[in-house]
Structures are given as C-alpha cells and as structure tokens.
Image (cartoon, rainbow, N blue to C red):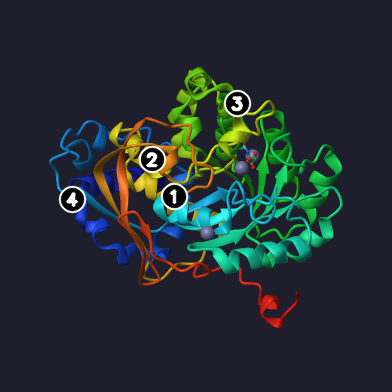
Amino acid sequence: MVVNRVHVDYARNEKSEIRNPKSRIRNPESEIQNPESEIQNPKSEIQNPKSRIRNPESEIQNPESEIQNPKSKMTTLTLPGLIDPHVHLRDPGATHKEDWHSGTAAALAGGFTCVLDMPNNTPPTTDGDALRAKQRAASEKAVCDYGIHFGAGADNVAIAASLAAQCIGLKMYLDQTFGPLRLDSLEPLVSHMRAFPKEAPVLCHAEGRTAAAAIFVAQLFDRPVHICHVSRKDEIELIRKAKEKGVRVTCEVTPHHLFLTRDDCEAIGAGRCEVRPMLATRADVEALRANLDIVDCFATDHAPHTLQEKDSASPPPGYPGLETALALYLELVREGILALDDVIARCYENPRRIFDVPAQAETWIEVDAEAEWIARGSEMRTRAQWTPFEGRLLRGRVTRVVLRGATVFENGDVLAKPGSGKNIRPNFSLSTGEG
Ligand code: NCD
Ligand code: ZN
Ligand code: ZN
Ligand code: ZN
C-alpha cells in the first residue's frame, strides 16, 4: 500500500515537472538550498525500485515532453551543480595526464561543481604524507570543490581508519586496473571493512566475483558498500537482488558503459579502447539500461591518459569523461529511459547522500539543452586531449556555472582562480604549517 502510494506520487511529479519544467528547474533554490527534502527521504526510491523507471508512462508516452520537442522552452535548464563521485585527477604524480587545475576546469566545463578524486596516484594516497601532498596540490589549483578518497593497502588499515574524517571514502581495488593499488587476498578486505568507520563510505573496484565478495563482507560487518563502475548484466542483477534483500549496497555506472560496447573498439582504436572494466556486450549495456532504477549514481570515472600513452605498445586503461558526460545523461532523457529528475538524482541527490557532500550555497549550472556540438578531444580542457566519443554529435552544453554566488564558468571560459575550489573535508592541519 505504502509502496503504491509512493509510486503514484513519483509518477505524478514526473509528469508535472516535465510538462512544466520551470516549476523546479528555473527555481534552483528550492532544491539546492533546501536539498534535505529529498535527501532525508532516500528510501522511497531504493526500496521501491520499480517505481520510476519500470513504469514511466509520463515521459515516454508523452510526445509533448519538453526534451523531445526542440521547439519547447526547455532550452535553458538550471540544474544543481553536479557531483562526480569518481575521477582521477593524477596530481601529484602524473600531471602530464591531468592536474588539479586542468581536471577541475574540465569538471566545470562539464557542469560538475564537486568531484571526488581517486587514490591510485604515484605515490598512491595510502598514508598521511600522500594525503597531505594531494590536499596541498588541490588547494593551490582546484577551480571546483573536491573531496579525496583514501586508498586501501595491504597494511594501512589503522591509518586509513584514523584519516577517515579528512577523506570522502575508502577505495579498495579488488581487481587489476591502472596503478599498483590492488588487494589480492581476503584478509585486508575483511580488516578494512571491519576497521573503517561505519558511517564513512567504502567503495570497491570489484568486477564479477569480487563484487559478490565485497558485498558479502560489507554485510558481515554491517556497513554499506558502494560498487564502482558496474558494467555487466550479472553484476547489476546481483546488486538488484542484494538491494531487494535489504543489503546496503549502492552503485554507480559510467557514461561509456551505457553508450559503448566492445564493438566500438574498432572505431575507437585498440589502445584507446582499453578501460577497466572493459567495454562489454550489447546485452550488458541493455541490462544496465534496464536496471537504471537501482543505479544510485552516475560517475564518469574520468581517467585521463595521453594519446601517446594510449597509442603505445602498453596502453594504460581509462577514458577522460568529464566534458561529455552531461550531454550523454541528457541523451538518456531524450531516449525516454530516464526523466530529468532521475538524472538529477544520480548526479546530485544520491551522490550527496551516499558520500555526505555538503550543500554548496548559491550554486547551480545553466545548460543549453538543445545546443548541438561535436565531441572533439583537441577542444577539451582535459590535458588528455582525446575522448572515446570523438566525432559524436552531442546535445546539451553547459553555458554557465555559478559556484557560491560567483560565475566560475561562462560560454567556454573558466573564470575561477586556481585554488578557489574548496576541499569538502577540510584538513585543519594544513594551516598549521608542515612543509
Ligand atoms: C582508471 C585509471 O586510469 O586510473 N582506469 C580505468 O580504466 N578505469 C582506474 C580505475 O578506475 O579502475
Ligand atoms: Zn593549470
Ligand atoms: Zn576502477
Ligand atoms: Zn576509476
């Protein structure tokens, strides 16, 4: 009964919002400055996973929905500043690929006002010194807000737990990917799951069977776990099953796993196509799309490498993604798979809730939803200067970003000063010196 009522309310909301986008979108305050309304009631969607997407009469069968009608007034969308919970900004250690300035400039160009950075740097973010070095680099260069994920190693269990308050979450690599961070055995997986503060997020790069292991061990220790870049049918179906059983697992999906299959590798090029998890089959992509109702977050997994590296004999895995993501998310709306609200949930509300991202006052983005453009790596702000979506026609472009009341990006120009971005888990020891 309750479930049905939630469902009906959602359906009604979707319809009214799509038909009358101004009510919500032109008035960002209602959501941005008072985001609790939705965040404190997160269960409705997750515990009733079928509600929105499995039965979305509203937009799909409603040809008048604004996004599908180019003549509508939905040209300028005002949305909350997006949060990307999974980026690799490579600083320190590999600033020829990206640094805190180029990476956060790419974030603003893509509509993100907060990015959460991964720990597989050189050296990895697995101790206090490495964390401070990263905090310092970010504090000097970032133009959007940011948080830092800490890396789980084989013997930093106590250190990780003690630094949890300065980080967003603890990242565990349970499979081989770029960089040296990988937990090969059961013991550190168990120890970190036991020791890391229960209220702080644990995120796992876990493909196939390691995803099952991560979910199981997290449950044994009564803690939530977040599965990164889910890419396969069997994985998303396992996560659905776990959620239906009440297991506290959340997950994210990347734009490339929603829009590309391994068949695209021929056009992309073998080395450039390398990414972890690898691009999958059409059936996997369809399964992700069919299960979007239980996908909590969209994450770019922005993983820049240079073209020289990607085209070399040993190409590192990873794609840049910050500058193409929003147009692809909006493509899902045009395709009728998601409502605009569903995109906002996955790029803002759910990441905020899962990673405890503080509200950014007077912060929003303006998007020309109908602007058409061709993805060109050479025109991007990422130092990688390439994209797996090269040549693709995209629709939807960020025209303005306002962060804490200041216009930080407008019509292609980054206006924010390096260092104006804020660490959302400020490190007070930084101000006390330490060279
Ligand atoms: C990422 C990278 O390059 O840091 N590469 C990737 O293929 N996704 C690492 C990761 O997220 O697994
Ligand atoms: Zn710079
Ligand atoms: Zn990964
Ligand atoms: Zn990653």
Q: Nearer the viewer, mark 2 or mark 4?
A: 2
Task: Point out residue 405 in the picture as x, y percentages from the top left corner.
Answer: 36, 72
Residue on which disc 4 sits: 20
Residue on which disc 1 sits: 347
Q: Nearer the viewer, mark 4 or mark 3?
A: 3
Front residue of 397/358: it is 397
Crowding at dot 2, Cα within 10 Å, few <14 / some 14-19 / many 20+, comes out as many
Residue on which disc 2 sits: 329
Looking at the rendering, the quadrant in which ligand 3 lies is top right
Q: Residue at x 46, y 31 (%)?
A: 258
Q: In the image, what residue type sits under mark 3? A: Gly
Could you tell me if the residues under marks 1 and 2 are in contact, i.e. CB atoms within 8 Å? yes
- Mark 2 → mark 4, Cα distance in angstroms: 20 Å
Task: Point out residue 226 in the picture as x, y percentages from the top left corner.
Answer: 61, 46
- Does residue 409 lie above or below 56 as drawn? below
Front residue of 147/297: it is 147
Q: In the image, what residue type sits under mark 4? A: Asn
Task: Point out residue 311 in the picture as x, y percentages from the top left corner.
Answer: 60, 28
| Helix, strand or loop under label 1 | helix
| Helix, strand or loop under label 2 | helix
- Tell me the number on the disc at residue 271: 3
Q: Earlier in the sequence, mark 1 or mark 2?
A: 2
The total of numbered circles placed on residues is: 4
Image quarter hosting the C terminus: bottom right
Could you tell me if the residues under marks 2 and 3 are in contact, i.e. CB atoms within 8 Å? no
- Does residue 48 lie above or below 176 as drawn? below
Left or right, 23 with respect to 208, comes to left
Q: Earlier in the sequence, mark 2 or mark 4?
A: 4
